[in-house]
Image (cartoon, rainbow, N blue to C red):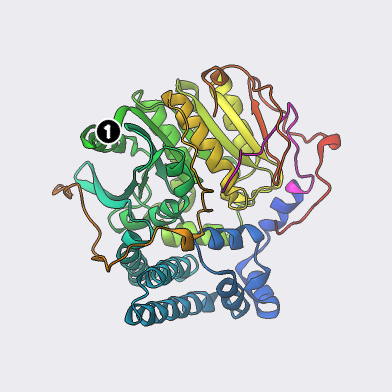
Amino acid sequence: MSGEPSHLVSPEIRRWRLAPDAWRLSGRVTLNRLERYLRYRSAKGLPASMKARFLAMGVPQATIDEVLGDIHGLDQWMDRWNLAAQRFLTEARGEERAGRWQEAAIARVNAAMAFHIAHLVTDSDPRILRTLRASSVTTFAQAIPRVMPTVRRLSIPWRTRSLPAYLSVPTQGEGPFPLLVLLNGVTTCKEELMLWSPPLVAAGVAVLAVDWPGTGESASFTAPVADCDDLTDGVFLIADEHPDLDASMVAIGGVSLGGGVAIRCAVNDRRLLGAMAVTPPFDPVSWWDYVNPLVRMQLVTLGVSEKAPEDVVADFDLTDLVPRLQLPLLVFGAGRDMVVPPEESLALSAAAGDLATLVWYPAGGHCLYHEMPDWLALTAQWVNGLAGQTEIRPSEPVPAPYEYETAALIPSPADFEPELPYEESRNEGFEESTRVDPIEETIEPEPVPAQTAHLRVPIASRPDPESIDDEDDLWR
């Protein structure tokens, strides 16, 4: 990623005119219909936003096309991606025998992500989920010291447990550096988020990616827990002890459901500088009945719980919580989100009032994988602005989160066992004024236009006919 983030400041929010129809049709996509679609078209016809997610993991485009093209049924998903992971591991062992340690580490990261993708669509057998998750976590931990040498694995104490996390601290510039805590969604994991972190770290922002309770590795001991805002106590403990961090410069953010948890943390912990959320839910009960069956299946299988899915979702409602927010809020919304309705980001920003800054991507999908370089750059500006820090300008272009080939080389073989600087718990460029005033400068949108606005009043739920995007694609 290089250059300034591109965003368009506009009082109008461009809506996708097919959004209501797309959501209505999405609810009718039963598993049987999806099976028929896959039988004749293969998984290569899946939404572009899902493929963009795989690219953000670093999985080569050729592998994505090959594996998806070979999937003609949901029952083949796990087997095909597991096979891809095994091929990457074979490649890694061959590179290691040849002494090409960097290439071997990249192949292991690809294998870890393939294991992770494999468990996104699988049966509900908890043993299979645990095996795939453990394979992904272990393989990633073996490779990350070489691909991203500054990253360290650690544990955050939380109640009687500990939450696994990865920490990356800038090596350029003078500390202490501001810290951004990143929380994943139900299907994402800290490993994914850490692969996104290089642009943030290059801008002078330390990143702590955490599997919050019920996600990633933490799913081994609990279902998704909404009221886990006390995890910030462990975060501030780490910030206090680390020589290059400052506990007075900690912000929190999250994607999808993790964005809602980040907001909950900001409401209940005033030590934080602010909260950031990418396509988060706001009032999930109101639209849960319209969610497509595949998303439902993922929540049931990955967020294993004795509660009914609708009851789990209800725990993450923010409608009564946001009015208590007293910290700045940065919201990234996607106009073509088919997992969380686009209106949720608008309603959340409106409810937060002057505290909220909304960045709107009219053509964006859930989690904004296509637009990742842009919203990561904006997030770095925002965190540095809140902390009163000057953003670091890297001397060389920063690679996109998935361009691992540009990672620093290590001349000699490194021990693949990740360093644990903290003992495992034995008990299980926004300016300051933009907090309240609209941004007036307009930057030419390139390549993906976004809209930034401060929302002071509720937004009408009906789209403006004059603001409809002409490029309509149900699979965006």
- The answer to whether one can see residue 283 in this image is no
Q: Nearer the viewer, residue 294 or 170?
A: 170
Which sits in the foreground, 337 or 34?
Answer: 337
Q: Does 403 lie within the magenta span? A: no
Name the image quarter holding residue 133: bottom left
The residue drawn where x is 27% and y is 34% is: 239
Residue 452 in picture, x, y percent from top left: 65, 31
The image shows residue 112 at horizontal and vertical percentages of 40, 67
Q: Which residue is mark 1?
A: 236
Q: Main secondary structure of the magenta part?
A: loop
Instruction: Using the rendered image of the protein, determine whether residue 329 is visible from the camera's viewpoint.
Output: yes
* Secondary structure of residue under mark 1: helix
Amino acid at circle 1: Phe
Image coordinates of residue 397 in percent, x first then y, are 54, 48
Position of residue 147 relative to residue 250, above or below, is below
Q: Is residue 264 left or right of residue 431?
A: left
Q: Is residue 170 above or below residue 196?
A: above
**Highlighted range, magenta:** 1-19
Dividing the picture into quadrants, the one containing residue 357 is top right
Within the magenta stretch, is there residue 5?
yes
